[in-house]
Amino acid sequence: MSPVTVNGVTISRKAIAAEVQNFPARNPGEGWRAATRALVIRELLLQEARRQGICAEQRTDEDGRRETMEDAQVRDLIEREVRVPAADEETLRRFYENNRRRFVTPSLFEADHILIGARRDDKGAFAAARERASSLRAILAAAPERFAALARDCSDCPSGALGGSLGQIGPGDTTSEFEAALIELAPGDISAPVETRYGVHLIHLKRRIDGSQLPFEAVRERIASYLVEHVQRQATAQYVSLLVGQADITGIVIEGSSSPLVQ
């Protein structure tokens, strides 16, 4: 395997091996290539920063971590060379109108549940939990008003003491399987048995509070920040591509304009 060089400077295999941990991949070869590419681009930017005589002041983040001198040089170079204009009011409003569904408060659900606890890796216990939940579901099909009482008597969740009440829950508050089942229910419905890593659930949806549209003024700054970041990524990738095109790089082919420094 030929050595990787950037304008005559060799990127050592030791440095690449250390960098691989920052690039999880489907296979070792893919991770190695990603790490090599990142180090090549970093070296290219450092060489350009030194050529321009950049000596940047190191910054400290909110957690007290101080950036290295090389990180400071790369940051300063990009800040000098990649200028991103702020989006005007018309652009911000157009983005809002074209993406209104992105600016809606999440729906909330007021729900109760009964949990028959079991671990998935205990096949016997999980099968028994399924059977128990199915039996309770049959009882509730005939007498849904018994949900709270059955939760108090049968549920393995602490909420059972409250008749199974989970209060108001929103996206991310429960497991993905529980949430997917909850979304499909109409107020008053009781779900079929729902399997999660905790066991088997029966869910009773009491009330759904649909999300509401956020006004433009409430999300204006969020949109502005997103657009600046988006344009910054594109512009930085184009700048890196320009440097790559002017450089003498061996041992790897740098394709495309995407820069790992801005991903």
Image: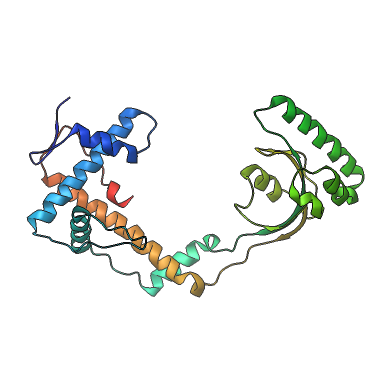
Instruction: Point out residue 172 in the picture as x, y percentages from the top left corner.
Output: 59, 52
For residue 234, side relative to residue 69 (left or right): right
In this rendering, is residue 197 above or below 112?
above
Instruction: Point out residue 14 in the picture as x, y percentages from the top left corner.
Output: 21, 33
Residue at image coords 83%, 42%: 154
Instruction: Point out residue 237 in the picture as x, y percentages from the top left corner.
Output: 26, 51
Name the quadrant containing residue 21: top left
Q: Quadrant of the N terminus?
A: top left
For residue 35, side relative to residue 135 (left or right): left
For residue 204, side relative to residue 11 (left or right): right
Name the quadrant containing residue 220: bottom left
**Residue 106 seen in this snapshot:** yes
**Residue 255 seen in this snapshot:** no
Of the pair 231 and 125, the residue shown nearer to us: 125
Of the pair 11 and 125, the residue shown nearer to us: 125
Name the quadrant containing residue 22: top left
Residue at image coords 67%, 59%: 108
Residue at image coords 30%, 52%: 262
